[in-house]
């Protein structure tokens, strides 16, 4: 089932010196239940493309349709809250919250009671392979792999069915990298998530159901 | 959720939070303390304004000293020195730009009013008599005369047929009198008899001697202080005694003698009436040497509107059998700008330039609203006359006494005073100096207000410093910690935004903790500041010298039911503390939202990118 459709999307931004056209007339579509990998060299526009899909930026031209609805016309805060989750290379967990609280956070944003959120958060953490001893640890006390798994657990807890990951294994060793990729694949294949991974890593790309490549802002 | 995570944030950074709490408390403390002290001092100054009054008096200075040579028939020559003022400076010079009067400087006359009791000056001897010498001779010592006809005078003093003695006691060239000639003269008491013609009289018999006055001149003046031309006075032969011939009373001089004799008693029945703009412009009242003992003072409105009300002395009240609330009719017939003599209004002559007694120029019934009593403390020309009556200046039509001025003098502290706003003496004097008028001395009396005000102004300055420090400290602390709390949580802001929180939710989430600390710190600081106000006030009261007895006397004599001068009693309520606290919280909200707004203007990925860099 087609979850996201991208039609002729272009985007540019202004840095200190010049206007940079980061995404050029990209068209593609993404279906639920698959894991997509978008590869490309640094500066090819893949991370920018991901932020357009996450509703963090707006395309200059073209449109992004999410389940047939134009993203530009949607409440993008609500879209991020309810439909998508983003996992980053740098994890971006709340430093002042422990693992369980980090995972609870998006659920509480959706109005789920604290008690229920806690139960579900603990389940999510266990699903990503984290034991109870990690529940009350703060991000600084965790390894990179643990932090990324907490980030994925948070993404799962958000209950959106689109997961965007920007270099999710960039800071991990090979063992942790493998675990994370397995997790993402599991979400796509067993939970019917649409998983889009932006990566440099050919091994991660290889494991994706669909691999796409970007060069100079275009999908090739 | 918002509060929980904010609390979590506070608890995870205790040092920062405690420091913010502490410094917010200190700022609020300084703000409240400064605000309270400023308010207290402002209130005290306001109260002082109500009970203190700055009065100025104007006096024409002595221009030069004259030495005068005198003759005394008993002791020979003697010399006196007199201070002379020179040319009279008109009252109009006091009307100048920049004076800023509350009540302008007016030279006030005493208005003579006739009452039905002998309440006026008592010219101990003032007898008009036709007399013949017992024998011809010169009056260079006690010289016997027989009273042929007493035209005016108490029979207990002199009656027809009495032998009395005259002497030109103070004239070196004594006059001669012929036996068989009748002279008319006004007798004034000069002491006891002396000389060869009274050797048979023992000293202890205390037989009086008179010196004969011969003047029927008028001493009428214009408002400008010019003597009104009097043809009779001009032609008067100063040293001749009028001889009573058959048709003497048909002559101008004769008629004047009769008019004088007829109106001789006026002065006995004349009370001095002082038209005023405020009772305290009379220095005995200002110094509290005169105080209302019954009834009340004339109000500001009564003075302004010229209501027919008056204050009378307790002695006059007794004499006239009047009480506060009674009515008193005051027929005013003369005005005298001269200084009082022995606390009495002493009109040199009650004849105007036409040789007639001054006619009544204004008469109306006054309500006695108050009776005052005086002490003898006030001296040096500031004292009240005996039986002085005080009425509003505006109760008598403007310049109504212009044609009835029986005496003129310079401006003196006793007859010219004014009121200016407290604390404006320097401004007044600066404006006065610009006039370039020489010869006047202006004295100010403020009962120590200036010293007191300086003390309070110092305390106000201290309060303003507290307040300013509190404000500056508060703003700096809020700016610093707002940056620390908000910028320090850039990652949280970015992640919250990534997770779909709206900007508003994000702001509330981040700022709740900041505001919570600000509220706690401000509340604690405000409460401490409010409590510390008491101690600060006490300390300043102990260290500030309320520096002279006058101010203390004024404060002591102020009606304490109406004024409240205790600094402690002036302490503002909790509203001031609350207002300061609320002000600080408002600043926290403004600063917090300002910094937050800047932060939210950035896209979350931009923030995260900056953090990674």
Image (spheres, rainbow, N blue to C red):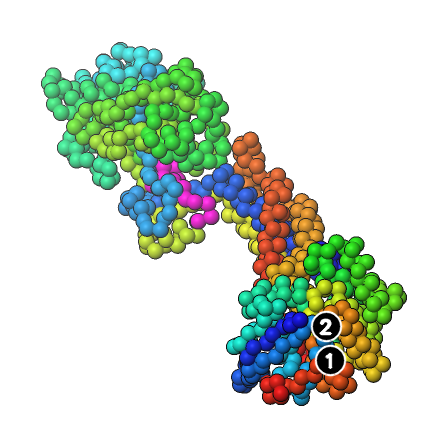
Residue placed at 40% from the left, 33% from the top?
A: B300
> Residue B151: x percent and y percent?
23, 16
Q: Is residue B582 left or right of B160 when viewed as pictured?
A: right
Label 2: which residue?
A33
Q: Are marks 1 and 2 in contact (CB under 8 Å)?
A: no
Residue placed at 19% from the left, 19% from the top?
A: B258
Tell me if residue B335 can be seen. yes
Which tag, 1 or 2, sits closer to the chain's start?
2
Q: Is residue B16 left or right of B565 when viewed as pictured?
A: right
- Asked if residue B529 is among those painted magenta in the image, a careful observer would answer no
Quadrant location, the N terminus of chain B: bottom right
Q: Which residues are magenta?
A: B411-425
Q: Are the residues under badges 1 and 2 in a single subunit?
A: yes
Q: Is residue A194 left or right of B309 when viewed as pictured?
A: right
B424 to A142, vertically: above or below: above
> Residue A63: x percent and y percent?
55, 74
Q: Which mark is residue B330?
A: none
Residue placed at 38% from the left, 31% from the top?
A: B301
In what element is the residue under mark 2?
Answer: loop
- Asked if residue B414 is among those painted magenta in the image, a careful observer would answer yes
A11 to B508, vertically: above or below: below
Dominant SS of magenta comes to: loop
Q: Is residue B193 left or right of B261 when viewed as pictured?
A: right
> Residue B571: x percent and y percent?
61, 42
Quarter of the image where one finds residue A198: bottom right
Label 1: which residue?
A209
Quadrant location, the C terminus of chain B: bottom right
Residue placed at 67% from the left, 63% from the top?
A: A82
In what element is the residue under mark 1?
Answer: loop
């Amino acid at each position: 089932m087609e979850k996201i459709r991208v039609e002729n999307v272009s985007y540019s931004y202004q840095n200190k010196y010049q206007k940079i056209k980061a995404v050029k007339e990209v068209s593609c579509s993404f279906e639920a239940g698959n894991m997509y990998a978008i590869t490309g060299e640094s500066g090819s526009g893949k991370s920018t493309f991901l932020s357009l899909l996450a509703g963090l930026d707006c395309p200059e031209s073209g449109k992004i349709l999410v389940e047939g609805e134009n993203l530009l016309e949607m409440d993008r805060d609500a879209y991020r809250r309810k439909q998508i989750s983003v996992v980053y290379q740098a994890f971006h967990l709340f430093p002042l919250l422990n693992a369980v609280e980090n995972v609870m956070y998006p659920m509480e944003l959706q109005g789920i009671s604290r008690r229920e959120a806690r139960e579900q958060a603990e389940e999510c953490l266990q699903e990503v392979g984290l034991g109870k001893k990690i529940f009350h640890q703060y991000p600084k006390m965790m390894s990179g792999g643990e932090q990324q798994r907490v980030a994925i657990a948070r993404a799962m807890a958000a209950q959106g069915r689109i997961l965007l990951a920007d270099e999710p294994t960039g800071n991990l060793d090979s063992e942790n990298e493998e675990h994370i990729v397995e997790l993402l694949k599991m979400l796509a294949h067993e939970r019917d998530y649409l998983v889009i991974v932006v990566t440099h890593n050919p091994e991660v790309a290889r494991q994706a159901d669909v691999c796409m490549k970007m060069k100079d802002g275009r999908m090739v | 959720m918002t509060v929980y995570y904010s609390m979590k944030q506070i608890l995870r950074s205790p040092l920062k939070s405690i420091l913010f709490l502490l410094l917010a408390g200190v700022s609020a403390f300084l703000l409240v303390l400064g605000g309270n002290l400023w308010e207290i001092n402002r209130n005290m100054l306001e109260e002082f304004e109500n009970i203190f009054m700055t009065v100025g008096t104007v006096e024409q200075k002595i221009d030069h000293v004259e030495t005068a040579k005198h003759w005394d028939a008993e002791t020979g020559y003697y010399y006196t020195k007199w201070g002379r003022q020179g040319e009279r400076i008109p009252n109009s010079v006091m009307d100048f730009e920049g004076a800023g009067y509350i009540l302008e400087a007016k030279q006030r006359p005493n208005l003579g009013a006739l009452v039905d009791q002998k309440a006026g000056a008592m010219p101990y001897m003032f007898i008009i008599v036709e007399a013949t010498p017992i024998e011809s001779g010169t009056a260079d010592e006690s010289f016997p005369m027989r009273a042929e006809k007493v035209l005016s005078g108490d029979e207990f003093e002199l009656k027809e047929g009495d032998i009395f003695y005259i002497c030109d006691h103070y004239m070196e060239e004594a006059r001669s009198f012929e036996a068989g000639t009748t002279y008319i003269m006004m007798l004034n008491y000069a002491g006891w008899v002396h000389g060869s013609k009274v050797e048979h009289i023992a000293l202890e018999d205390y037989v009086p001697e008179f010196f004969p006055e011969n003047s029927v001149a008028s001493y009428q003046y214009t408002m400008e202080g010019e003597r009104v031309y009097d043809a009779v006075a001009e032609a008067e032969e100063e040293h001749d005694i009028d001889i009573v011939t058959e048709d003497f009373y048909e002559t101008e001089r004769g008629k004047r003698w009769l008019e004088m004799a007829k109106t001789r008693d006026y002065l006995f029945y004349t009370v001095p009436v002082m038209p005023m703009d405020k009772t305290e412009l009379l220095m005995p009242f200002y110094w509290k040497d005169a105080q209302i003992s019954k009834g009340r003072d004339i109000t500001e409105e009564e003075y302004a509107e010229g209501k027919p009300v008056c204050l009378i002395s307790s002695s006059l009240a007794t004499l006239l059998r009047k009480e506060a609330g009674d009515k008193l009719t005051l027929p005013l017939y003369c005005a005298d700008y001269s200084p009082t003599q022995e606390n009495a209004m002493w009109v040199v002559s009650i004849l105007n330039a036409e040789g007639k007694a001054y006619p009544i120029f204004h008469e109306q019934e006054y309500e006695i609203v108050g009776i005052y009593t005086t002490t003898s403390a006030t001296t040096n020309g500031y004292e009240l006359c005996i039986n002085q009556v005080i009425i509003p200046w505006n109760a008598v039509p403007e310049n109504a006494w212009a044609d009835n001025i029986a005496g003129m003098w310079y401006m003196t502290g006793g007859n010219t005073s004014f009121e200016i706003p407290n604390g404006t003496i320097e401004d007044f004097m600066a404006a006065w100096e610009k006039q370039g008028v020489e010869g006047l001395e202006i004295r100010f009396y403020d009962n120590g207000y200036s010293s007191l005000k300086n003390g309070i102004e110092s305390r106000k300055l201290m309060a303003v410093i507290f307040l300013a420090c509190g404000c500056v400290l508060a703003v700096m602390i809020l700016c610093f910690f707002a940056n620390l709390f908000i910028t320090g949580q850039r990652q949280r802001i970015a992640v919250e935004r990534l997770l779909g929180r709206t900007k508003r939710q994000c702001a509330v989430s981040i700022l709740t903790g900041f505001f919570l600390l600000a509220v706690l710190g401000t509340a604690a600081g405000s409460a401490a500041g409010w409590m510390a106000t008491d101690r600060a006030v006490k300390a300043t009261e102990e260290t500030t010298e309320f520096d002279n007895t006058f101010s203390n006397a004024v404060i002591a004599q102020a009606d304490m039911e109406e004024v409240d001068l205790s600094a402690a009693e002036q302490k503002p309520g909790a509203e001031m503390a609350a207002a300061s606290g609320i002000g600080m919280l408002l600043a926290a909200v403004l600063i917090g939202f300002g910094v937050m707004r800047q932060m939210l203007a950035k896209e979350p990925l931009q923030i995260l990118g900056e953090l990674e860099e």
